[in-house]
Image: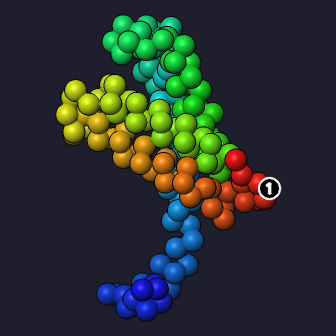
Amino acid sequence: MSTAAVRPLIPVLRPLTEALSPLAEPMVRVAAGLFLVPHGAQKLFGWFGGYGLEATGQFFAAKLGLPPVLALAAGLIEVFGGIALALGLATRAVAALAAGLLFVAAIQVHLSSGFFWTSGGYEYPLLWGIVALSFAIRGGGRYSLDAAIGREL
């Protein structure tokens, strides 16, 4: 059923929702990208209460059994991939990297704490991983740099 055939519950809101509808997907893409950036800054620079690259690498090795160099990769994906995702630049590629990173975080770091994010569970990284996966599948959309340059990865 097309959205034009659906009668709104509050008809007076229809012009507003129709006007804002094209911005809904870009708002989610920008938020998803920008929400990644401070997490990467924690890993790379120790900003926002983070531990920096060396300590994060030690955590990856000691607690997760992962090579410390993956702390650098995770931080780069979060900072630069997050910015690229927000801009809609190389959207499919950076969204796929972000989704992979978030799914690994959900499993390796948060799974043992249960579901709820308030207990350190996997709820938050899983949600954002699914959001990122949706952009890996769909691309950046009409309001992205990929669309502006007419190319995407």
| Quadrant in which the N terminus is drawn | bottom left
Expressed as whole percent of the image width and height from the top left, the position of residue 82 reads 57, 39
Is residue 86 found left or right of 17 in the rendered image?
right
Vertical relation: 54 (above or below) 45 = above
Left/right placement of residue 144 relative to residue 57 reads right
Q: Would residue 19 be seen by someone viewing this image from the given angle? A: yes
Q: How is the image coloured?
A: rainbow
Q: Quadrant of residue 11?
A: bottom left
What residue is at 36 percent from the left and 46 percent from the top?
127
In the depicted view, which residue is nearer to us: 41 or 60?
A: 60
Residue drawn at (47%, 78%) of the image: 17
Q: Residue furthest right?
A: 149
Q: Is residue 45 visible?
A: no
x, y (%) of residue 28?
Answer: 49, 56
**Label 1 Cα crowd, 10 Å radius (few <14 / some 14-19 / many 20+):** few
Residue found at x 41% / y 9%: 61
Task: Say what amino acid the circle numbered 1 marks.
Answer: Ile
Could you tell whether 106 is left or right of 145 in the image? Answer: left
Note whether 54 is above or below 44 in the view shown.
above
